[in-house]
Amino acid sequence: MKIAYVLNTYPQPSQSFIRREIHALEAQGHEVTRLAMRAGDAPLVDPLDQGEATRTAYILKSGGMGLARACLKQFASSPSRFRTAFRQAMALGKVSEVGRLRHLIYLAEAAEVAARCHAAGVAHVHAHFGTNAAAVALMSHTLGGPKFSFTVHGPEEFDAPRALALGAKIAASDFTVAISSFGRSQLCRWADGADWDRIKVVHCGIEPARFDAPAPLADGPRRVVAIGRLVEQKGQLALVQALAKTQSGIHLTLIGDGEMRSQIEAAIATHGLQDRITLTGWVGEERIRDELARAHALVMPSFAEGLPMVVMEAMAAARPVIATYIAGTPELVQQDVTGWLVPAGDTDALTQAMDHLAQAPLAYLQKMGTQGRARVLERHDVANEAAKLARYMGAD
């Protein structure tokens, strides 16, 4: 089956789950065209991301004149379809936070996407995130392009469901994907009851072969790792505060980068934690696996989430997880079975969980890790999830 992935920016260091999904579809014999509106701003340190960048077509590189020509061709081909798509752009722009002019740009992008899909013989378009990528996929379909679906990850989409017109996008889609049962429940809030059946759960997946021989837990002082964008919703600032209150010498490796880096660095200095926290910036997947192998647990202190990929990766590496009790996380992390769950924003509870980790016998942590590995491999094998997605797209 020929599939097009429509994305706003791609690839990005935080989008490894999209790359895995695409690669899994290709391994199953499907042909995937990558169409991103533009390249991301973050440097690509992972060779796999660098490879994806060379395989991605960037719509905005067509320039204003190129997009205008695409619109004229679409209008000449079917004035009625173009008028319908124009009305959709106006309706979506009216309720959005970015306005109608931005949605006219999305309409021009949709015209280019529809033309490229027609030229490539694409049978289905899939977008990731319920934001502008889903709007482009919707209008591309209206212009005569392939049927479309989109995956909603959260938490951003759940912060502004009306502004993103999620209900209208779900109604127009062939199907809509949530990455957890919690995510599906949130989409049902904004969809008409008649559209609930088109909302499917397809988990983000890990590649089991990359975690085929988990490293044993090392004896000695406990080490934890946290991985993610350094932004408010990820809660790393609370993690620094919690670590400052621990009664043990636990060491934290903080992987990622983002707008809150300077604030987090200042908090580390204020609490005198320079010797106990290593801040790496973005690193490739090999380094992430190395850090997980050295760690005794992953810490995910998020305030808002979908279902974090790093939790899956840590569990596949047979590492216990300390996470906040939010969104889809409790569907994977089980209290005292695969890790610890704490209330979001409760630094005392987070401190207590890390102290429990520091004091727990190594055998107890190993048991948790083994149970977590079995759970994630059962639920989040990317090959199985990609096959499920392809079936929803209509692949044989």
Image: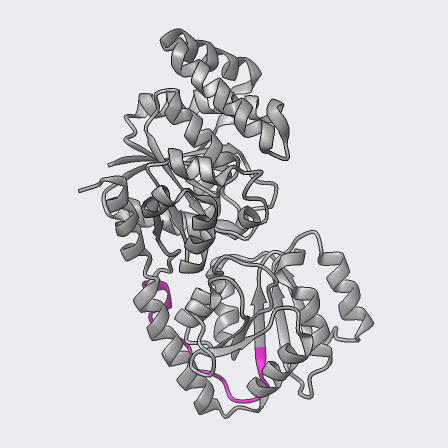
Q: Is residue 221 magenta?
A: yes
Please name whichever residue, 160 or 391, is drawn nearer the observer in this view of the structure: 160
Residue 295, x across and y down, in percent: 53, 76
- Can residue 68 be seen from the camera position used here? yes
Span colored in magenta: 209-223
* Total marks in image: 0
Q: Please tell me which residue is depicted at 34% across the width and 50% down the height of the picture.
A: 200
As for residue 256 lying within the magenta part, the answer is no
Q: Residue furthest front?
A: 193
Q: Position of residue 101 (x, y in %)?
A: 62, 22
Q: Quadrant of the N terminus?
A: top left
Q: Residue furthest top?
A: 76
Residue shown at the point (27%, 51%) measured from the top left: 388
Q: Is residue 316 placed above or below 354 in the rendered structure?
A: above
The image position of residue 312, as x and y in percent, is 43, 65
Question: Is residue 283 or residue 108 the one in the foreground?
Answer: 108
